[in-house]
Image (cartoon, rainbow, N blue to C red):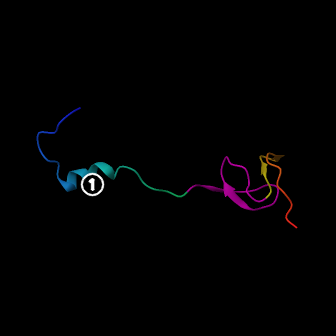
Amino acid sequence: MAHPKHKQSKRRTAARRTHYKAVASTLAVCSNCGAMHIYHTVCGECGYYRGKLAIEKLATV
């Protein structure tokens, strides 16, 4: 394992860690029920994905 010869400053450490941007996931409208869901995922409300039933949702009574 590598052993650093000198201490790395807090500023240099923080500068190394800031090269990404945290962004929220892109949302899409479900074509079946109209609810919002994350792109490329099954709709949590109705269980449809790209117009086809992907997950059978249980009816709550």
| First to last magenta residue range | 25-45
Q: Residues within 10 Å of mark 1 (few under 14, many from 20)?
A: few
Q: Main secondary structure of the magenta part?
A: loop
Q: Amino acid at mark 1?
A: Ala
Q: Is residue 29 left or right of residue 9?
A: right
Query: Which residue reaches farthest left?
Result: 6
Say which residue appears at 49% left-offset and 57% top-offset: 23
Say which residue appears at 88% left-offset and 67% top-offset: 61
Residue labelled with disc 1: 14
Q: Is residue 17 left or right of residue 23?
A: left
**11 within the magenta span:** no
Say which residue appears at 68% left-offset and 57% top-offset: 37
In the rendering, at what x and y percent does residue 40 appear? 67, 46
Question: Please, is residue 27 above or below residue 53 in the view?
Answer: below
**30 within the magenta span:** yes
Query: Which residue reaches farthest top?
Result: 1
In the rendering, at what x and y percent does residue 51 appear? 82, 47
In the rendering, at what x and y percent does residue 19 appear? 35, 49
In the rendering, at what x and y percent does residue 18 appear? 33, 53
Q: Nearer the viewer, residue 25 or 5?
A: 5
| Number of marks | 1
Q: Quadrant of residue 60?
A: bottom right
Q: Is residue 19 left or right of residue 25?
A: left
Say which residue appears at 27% left-offset and 54% top-offset: 14
Q: Secondary structure at mark 1?
A: helix
Query: Which residue reaches farthest bottom?
Result: 61
Q: Is residue 59 left or right of residue 6?
A: right
The N terminus lies in quadrant = top left
